[in-house]
Image (cartoon, helix red, strand yellow):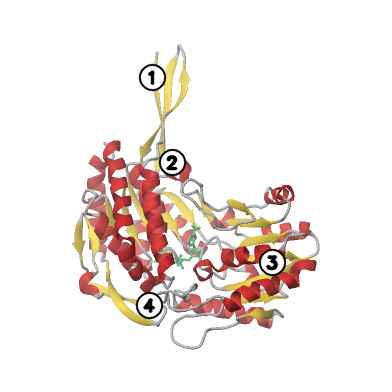
């Protein structure tokens, strides 16, 4: 693919740009395509198209329901065709790319069928009053590079269902699959309802400062999320921010280590650790620590890492050079801070951004690999003597996205889960996500939630309709 066949979708039209930017395949490190670099004028056109389209789009719920169902069918029908493009730009194995696209269809289908019913809050001799939900207008949506397509649908599907229109910008590392999806969805959506523009961080800044959108829905890092919140403030745009995490997994005393090791491993290393809510640190009781480290290291040593187009690969590369360098830096720092490498420990020889799945023991809080979000295939295991201490450390960061508790006794697990300060707590599981579950972070991990009726409500204003009697 080259710039000639990559287009943005603006007002239902397929649009090239005067300039383009490179897109690299992380499995090779080579540029394999170019994407349009949206100009300010083109962004203005997209915003104006979205504003125009919203006037009709907001009026007819039935049309919206049917259009979202048609989007779902389109995604199901084209998942296998788009998956190789997602693998090429993101790195994930082809099967995972196909699942991401099918999951995107599932999200559209879920919102096609979701209703936000008016709530009657008064019905007496004085008045009849209802709370209803009204669309906001144009939504600016900005997504990261780890799950570019499905995270876009967490915004686009509820925003459209609620009667808003959207201008969406994918990450410059992974623009192509989202551009392709938009091209296909423009066949089943009215012009201007979903506009997809591509470009770098500046384009994101222009979007957040643009006067048209009434809401910004952003997924990305904490640092950028703070900029987005600041950019939204002058004209009080609404924001939903889905930001970074440093999820703790607390393994309780008496847990069968052999039984949980594979689940813990995949909770941490799915998508090569590039998941906002992946396990990013494991707290293990001292008595089980060594066995757990060895069981996780065994998983890490035997998992097949390689180009996502190879059907044998279970883990792909890190998505981009910057993230690859960050993971390497954190692992080097962990070793310098006294951590011992039980598996991996560095890059895989050869081209591309491959990093060996890494398990590091012997660290404590204060090491960067424990305190910061690594967002890559390296996991610290930290021994604890007192579970109270493990809970305090799990909560003792600015993050609060999710966490998990692992135990043989569900009651015991529940008691610890109740005390974790984060948006989702899993027991004997991690990364179980679904369209009906609200997803969001406490503290610096986010503002607001996505998914479920709560996510849909996030794309609405609350209106009281009061009729005197
Ligand atoms: P990032 O913050 O660097 O970029 C995200 C998006 O924001 C990109 O499209 C980028 O171009 C755009 N952007 C950059 N600067 C901007 C600005 N000043 N104004 C507006 N837009 C701007 O994040 P990333 O590196 O792409 O993604 C990784 C991060 O995303 C990790 O921290 C991860 O935890 C987080 N994440 C969170 C969730 C969640 O749901 N909570 C999901 C996935 C990823």
Q: Secondary structure at mark 4?
A: strand
Which residue sits at x=30%, y=65%? 81
Q: Residue at x 73, y 71 (%)?
A: 291
Q: Position of residue 40 (x, y in %)?
A: 26, 63
Disc 3: which residue? 258
Q: Earlier in the sequence, mark 3 or mark 1?
A: 3
- Picture disc at residue 467: 1
Label disc, if present, on residue 374 of the rendered structure: none
Q: Residues within 10 Å of mark 1 (few under 14, many from 20)?
A: few
N-terminal of the pair, mark 3 or mark 4, is 4
Can you identify the residue that label 4 sits on?
25
Marks 2 and 4, the one that precedes in the sequence: 4
User: Is the C-beta of the residue carrying label 1 under 8 Å from the nearest atom of ligand 1?
Assistant: no
Relative to the observer, which residue lies in front, 212 or 305? Answer: 305
Question: Toward which corner of the image does residue 23 lie, by quadrant?
Answer: bottom left
| Gap in angstroms between the C-alphas marked 1 and 4 | 59 Å
> In terms of secondary structure, where does tag 1 sit?
strand
Label 3 or label 2, whichever comes before in sequence order: 3
- Asked if the residue at label 3 sits under 8 Å from ligand 1, the reply is no
Cα distance between the residues tagged 2 and 4: 37 Å
Quadrant of the rendering where the N terminus is positioned? bottom left
Residue drawn where x is 30% and y is 51% of the image: 73
Q: Specify which label sits upstream in the sequence, 1 or 2.
A: 2
- Left or right: 362 as drawn, with respect to 276: right
Q: Is residue 213 above or below residue 319?
A: above
Q: Is residue 460 visible?
A: yes
Q: Residue furthest bottom?
A: 350
How far apart are the alpha carbons under marks 3 and 2? 42 Å
Disc 3: CA contacts within 10 A as few (<14), some (14-19) or many (>=20):
few
- Residue picked out by circle 2: 457
Query: How far apart in space, not on screen, are marks 1 and 2 (Cα)?
Result: 23 Å
């Amino acid at each position: 693919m080259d710039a000639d066949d990559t287009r943005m979708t603006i007002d239902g039209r397929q649009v090239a740009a005067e300039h383009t930017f490179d897109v690299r395949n992380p499995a090779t490190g080579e540029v394999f395509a170019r994407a349009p670099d949206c100009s300010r004028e083109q962004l203005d056109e997209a915003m104006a198209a979205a504003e125009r389209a919203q006037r009709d789009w907001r009026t007819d719920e039935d049309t919206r329901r049917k259009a979202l169902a048609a989007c779902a069918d389109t995604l199901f029908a084209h998942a296998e065709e788009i998956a190789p493009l997602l693998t090429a730009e993101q790195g994930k194995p082809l099967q995972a790319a196909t699942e991401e696209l099918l999951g995107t269809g599932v999200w559209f289908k879920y919102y096609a069928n979701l209703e936000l019913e008016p709530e009657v809050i008064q019905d007496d001799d004085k008045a009849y009053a209802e709370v209803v939900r009204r669309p906001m207008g144009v939504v600016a949506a900005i997504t990261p590079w780890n799950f570019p397509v499905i995270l876009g649908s967490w915004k686009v599907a509820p925003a459209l269902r609620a009667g808003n229109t959207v201008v969406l910008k994918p990450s410059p590392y992974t623009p192509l699959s989202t551009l392709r999806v938009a091209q296909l969805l423009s066949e089943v959506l009215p012009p201007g309802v979903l506009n997809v523009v591509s470009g770098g961080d500046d384009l994101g800044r222009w979007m957040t400062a643009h006067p048209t959108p009434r809401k910004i829905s952003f997924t990305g890092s904490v640092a950028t999320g703070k900029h987005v919140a600041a950019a939204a403030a002058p004209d009080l745009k609404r924001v939903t921010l889905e930001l970074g995490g440093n999820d703790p997994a607390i393994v309780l005393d008496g847990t069968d280590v052999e039984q949980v090791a594979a689940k813990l491993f995949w909770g941490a290393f799915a998508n090569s650790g590039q998941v906002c809510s992946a396990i990013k640190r494991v707290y293990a009781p001292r008595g089980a620590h060594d066995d757990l480290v060895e069981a996780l290291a065994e998983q890490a040593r035997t998992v097949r890492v390689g180009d996502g187009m190879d059907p044998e690969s279970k883990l792909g590369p890190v998505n981009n050079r910057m993230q690859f360098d960050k993971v390497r830096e954190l692992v080097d720092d962990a070793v310098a801070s006294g951590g011992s490498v039980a598996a991996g420990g560095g890059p895989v020889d050869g081209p591309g951004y491959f990093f060996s799945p890494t398990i590091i023991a012997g660290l404590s809080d204060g090491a960067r690999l424990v305190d910061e979000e690594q967002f890559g295939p390296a996991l610290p295991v930290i021994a604890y003597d007192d579970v109270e201490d493990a809970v305090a450390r799990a909560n003792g960061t600015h993050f609060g996205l999710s966490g998990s508790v692992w135990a043989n006794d569900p009651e015991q697990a529940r008691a610890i889960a109740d005390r974790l300060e984060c948006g989702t707590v899993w027991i004997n599981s991690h990364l179980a996500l679904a369209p009906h579950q609200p997803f969001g972070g406490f503290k610096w991990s986010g503002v607001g939630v996505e998914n479920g009726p709560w996510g849909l409500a996030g794309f609405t204003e609350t209106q009281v309709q009061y009729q005197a009697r």
